[in-house]
Amino acid sequence: MMCLRLFMWRVTIGKPVEQGNQRLLTNDSTALTGSDCLRAAERRALSTIMAAEDQMKATVVALILDSKTEEAIQVASNWYRVSVPTLGIGVVEGKTKGVAAVYSQKRKEILAARREFMFDPFVMIHEFYHHLRSVSGHHRGTEKQADRFALDFIDAYRRLAAARRAEG
């Protein structure tokens, strides 16, 4: 659908339409308004942004699975325009039982309890969410929201992997 003017016009399939001294052409037979044109442009732009965001999320997951966690966190930090947290192995005092990793807000550091958790996308992205929320100035993120954030990255990875398998 091609939008040429920000006012309402009548359209005939494939033929130019005269309205006043304006000549307009489109490929369908609907009446459009300027706000319809803007919404269509916004949808296309949003679709492009969402595709780029899905690509970034899939890249982050793939890098973590390839044991390139530092690079993955760098990519995510650049996307969200926040500082890059440091990564380490260990635990914060008092946070040892049943914990795969923690985020230390004071040190701006993601600490994995064991080395294998450094290469678990869910764990690393979950903790990156806590970094993202604390750096943004309003850390009100819950564990449930951090889980959703991490699962969204993993879902984007799965969608893109399935699309690539379907292509060839």
Image: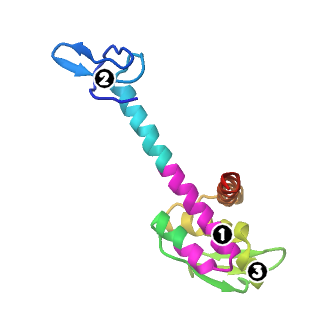
What's under tag 1, amino acid-wise? Ala
The tag earlier along the polypeptide, 1 or 3, is 1
Q: Tell me the magenta residue range.
A: 49-74
Per the rendering, the mark at residue 10 is none
Label 1: how many Cα within 10 Å (few below 14, some 14–19, many 20+): some
Q: Is residue 65 in the magenta section? A: yes
The tag earlier along the polypeptide, 2 or 1, is 2
Q: Which residue is mark 3?
A: 94
Residue 135 is situated, as x and y percent measured from the top left of the image, at 50, 68
Label 2: how many Cα within 10 Å (few below 14, some 14–19, many 20+): some
Q: Which residue is mark 2?
A: 25
Left/right placement of residue 33 relative to residue 143 reads: left
Q: What kind of colouring is applied to the model shown?
A: rainbow
Q: Nearer the viewer, residue 131 or 64?
A: 64
At x 55%, y 62%, the residue is: 56
Report how many numbered discs are placed on residues in the image: 3
At x 75%, y 77%, the residue is: 117
Q: Which residue is mark 1?
A: 62
